[in-house]
Amino acid sequence: MDIVELFIDETDEVSGIEAISVVENPAIEENFIALKNQEFKLAEVDKEKRILMGAALIPSKPIYRQNGEQEYYIYFSKATVRKASELFFINGNQSNSTLEHQLELKGLTAVESWIVESEQDKSRMYDLNVPMGTWMVSMKVNNDDVWKKVKAGEIKGFSIEGYFADKLERPNEPNELKAQDTLKELKKLLTSE
């Protein structure tokens, strides 16, 4: 099966992430958590904070795709994950969000963003055991309809929307050592999950 690396083409001004979609089944297979004041013992313990925290992009995570008869995996390198997270804010896209990649939403804003760089990462406090290099996002939800869907379990994670260049890697072609190494790495990830 083909493996396609997605990356940011810095010569293309539209390359990068335009929005974060809230979805029931995130392609990266990581659900977010909903944070409430009760977890932090703040003054107003009866009111929810309405913040969602979760992984937006995980480096080297094989993501299955199908286009007609063609089946393949895509993945993002650590460098692409970092660059995408930076461009998301540089381009002012922190308030761009959709529901299931279809309906444009108002009232969702990325209020926190970071790259996981150590085992002492904040994500570990919430039992989110994601790999190093993962882009984590916290989003404030000021949209009552979306929050109701979160509480009902209809929305469970983030999924990015954007434009990326791609590089096809065909592991069975001769002299493609990098592709073979990538395939081995992705197979290892697939079998360990």
Image: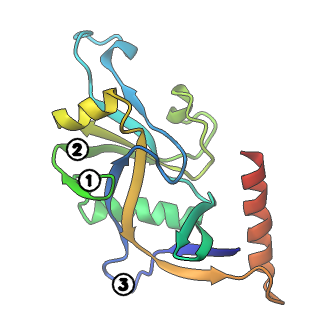
Q: CA distance from mark 3 to mark 1?
A: 22 Å
Disc 2 packing (10 Å; few <14; some 14–19; many ≥20) = many
| Element at label 2 | strand
- The structure residue drawn at horizontal position 26% and vertical position 66%, both measured from the top left corner, is 91
Residue on which disc 3 sits = 12
Disc 1 packing (10 Å; few <14; some 14–19; many ≥20) = many
Which is more N-terminal, label 3 or label 2? 3
Q: Is residue 8 above or below residue 49?
A: below
Q: Is residue 99 above or below residue 126?
A: below
- The structure residue drawn at horizontal position 36% and vertical position 63%, both measured from the top left corner, is 161
| Of residues 87 and 100, the one drawn nearer to the viewer in this rendering | 100
Residue on which disc 2 sits = 108
User: Which residue is most to the right?
Assistant: 174
Q: CA distance from mark 1 to mark 2?
A: 6 Å
Q: Is residue 102 left or right of residue 34?
A: left
Q: Are marks 1 and 2 in contact (CB under 8 Å)?
A: yes
Label 3 is placed on what type of residue? Asp
Instruction: Name the front one of labels 3 and 1.
Output: 1
Instruction: Name the front one of labels 2 and 3.
Output: 2
Q: Is residue 45 above or below residue 9?
A: above
Residue 12 image position (x, y, % from top left): 36, 84
Residue 191 image position (x, y, % from top left): 78, 51
Label 2 is placed on what type of residue? Leu
| Of residues 81 and 159, the one drawn nearer to the viewer in this rendering | 159
Q: Name the disc covering residue 62, or none.
A: none
Q: Name the disc covering residue 97, or none.
A: 1
- The structure residue drawn at horizontal position 74% and vertical position 69%, both measured from the top left corner, is 182
Residue 29 image position (x, y, % from top left): 55, 47
Disc 3 packing (10 Å; few <14; some 14–19; many ≥20) = few
